[in-house]
């Protein structure tokens, strides 16, 4: 049984109502006073009339993005929107993916290999990339979810135990995490978990609480701990990923293993949703991973992965996040097996997402082809793809993967 609804701030609900309600027009500005107008006229008359308007300063990040876009054909641009998994026990398939210009490679599974061995492979991929360097992603949370466990990688406690550490010790642990990943050439950590699991419900919360993946039982507990991890990763040029928006703390099944997982409780005014928004606006520019569950009180017609209400209206609009939104796995996950792989990618991008994550490489060509075909047939969707590619490349430019 799911836990009871939590108290939600009325102010947030009111604010969301304002965001979701269309306004028929904007009020006209009040006329300025005569004295203010006279002063402005006088000041304007005194200004030199021969001065040329100054050009706005160039944005080096967008200059890099523009240059990268100009060098990529349409298929290569779409490939930048895919992060594709290869198994840690055999990373060789990643060579072909990188040669094809994939946006990122996800190291799937568990490995006892030393950091030097991982670094040799990721370094090869970085040097051989024909265009923008790929994200090298991994699941490195701690506890039961730590992909890299060999020499050179500190064994991390589960998030629930990390959350019990004094702030200075947690900051030190986060710094070690960032150091270890950077030494192996990892640029994207699919962590930390922001999901809030109410006290007493942990055992029934199969994807998070049962494994101690949560930092606490209230947003007030979770936010400072997650921020410390995000900052520790960023200090070593490793991008963090806040997951799983809008939260998996109230579900009783794992979307990787069960279809139709639903959270009937969470609303836009939930404190957990606000916690994601606060953390997503961090100067460290983390990614946000969207949940594969369905939230009927946000959108009864689609899982969050395919929901424009969840991604565009709530996350991008109400919470003001303009960065990279990435899926949870949409390749092998049971949650999506009734949807053709190409449609999974198209529907996510239509909803406002950026990067499609699949732990299985077999569906990668089908996803790229489906996005290309839809963009060619639908100018509006082509614009959506343009926006997603620019967002993806901007994130790479900001972390040095274009320079």
Image: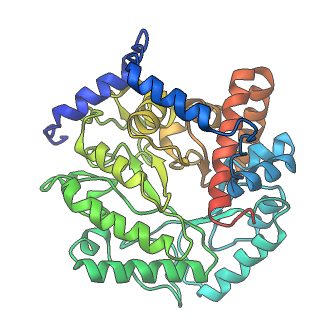
| Residue 207 percent across, percent down from the top left | 34, 54
Which colour scheme appears in the figure? Answer: rainbow
Position above or below: 252 against 26: below
Position above or below: 401 against 304: below
Residue at image point 43% right, 11% down: 25
On screen, residue 237 versus residue 193, left or right, reads: right
| Residue 240 percent across, percent down from the top left | 48, 63
The quarter of the picture where residue 94 lies is bottom right
Q: Quadrant of the C terminus?
A: bottom right
Q: Is residue 121 visible?
A: yes
Residue at image point 21% right, 61% down: 221
On screen, residue 24 versus residue 341, left or right, reads: left
The quarter of the picture where residue 348 lies is top right
Residue at image point 80% right, 56% down: 101
Of 190 and 8, nearer the camera is 8
| Residue 192 percent across, percent down from the top left | 40, 63
Of all residues, the one furthest to the top in this rendering is 24
Of 141 and 51, nearer the camera is 51
Q: How many numbered marks have been drawn onto this rendered protein structure?
A: 0
């Amino acid at each position: 049984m799911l836990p009871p609804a939590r108290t939600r701030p009325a102010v947030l609900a009111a604010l969301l109502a304002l965001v979701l309600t269309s306004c028929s027009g904007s009020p006209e500005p009040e006329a300025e006073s005569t004295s203010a107008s006279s002063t402005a006229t006088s000041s304007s008359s005194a200004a030199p009339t021969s001065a040329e308007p100054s050009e706005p300063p160039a944005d080096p990040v967008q200059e890099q993005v523009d240059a990268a876009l100009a060098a990529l054909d349409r298929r290569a641009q779409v490939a930048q929107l895919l992060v594709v998994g290869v198994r840690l026990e055999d990373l060789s398939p990643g060579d072909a993916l990188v040669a094809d210009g994939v946006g990122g490679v996800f190291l799937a599974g568990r490995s006892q290999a030393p950091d030097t061995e991982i670094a040799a492979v990721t370094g090869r991929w970085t040097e051989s990339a024909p265009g923008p360097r790929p994200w090298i992603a991994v699941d490195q949370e701690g506890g039961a979810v730590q992909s890299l466990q060999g020499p050179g990688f500190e064994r991390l406690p589960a998030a629930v135990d990390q959350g019990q550490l004094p702030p200075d010790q947690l900051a030190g642990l986060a710094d070690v995490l960032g150091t270890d990943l950077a030494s192996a050439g990892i640029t994207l950590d699919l962590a930390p978990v922001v999901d809030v699991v109410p006290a007493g419900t942990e055992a029934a919360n199969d994807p998070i609480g049962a494994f101690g993946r949560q930092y606490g039982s209230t947003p007030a507990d979770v936010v400072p701990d997650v921020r410390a991890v995000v900052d520790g990763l960023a200090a070593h040029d490793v991008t963090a990923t806040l997951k799983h928006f809008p939260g998996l703390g109230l579900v009783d099944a794992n979307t990787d293993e069960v279809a139709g997982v639903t959270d009937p409780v969470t609303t836009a005014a939930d404190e957990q949703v606000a916690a994601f928004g606060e953390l997503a606006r961090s100067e460290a520019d983390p990614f946000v991973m969207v949940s594969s569950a369905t939230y009927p009180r946000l959108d009864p017609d689609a899982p969050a992965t395919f929901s424009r209400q969840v991604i565009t209206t709530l996350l991008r609009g109400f919470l003001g996040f303009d960065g990279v939104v990435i899926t949870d796995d949409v390749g092998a996950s049971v949650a999506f097996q009734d949807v053709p792989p190409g449609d999974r990618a198209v529907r996510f991008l239509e909803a406002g997402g950026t990067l499609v994550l699949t732990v299985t490489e077999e569906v990668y060509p089908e996803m790229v082809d489906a996005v290309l075909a839809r963009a060619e047939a639908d100018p509006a969707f082509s614009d959506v793809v343009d926006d997603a590619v620019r967002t993806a490349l901007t994130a790479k430019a900001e972390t040095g993967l274009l320079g």
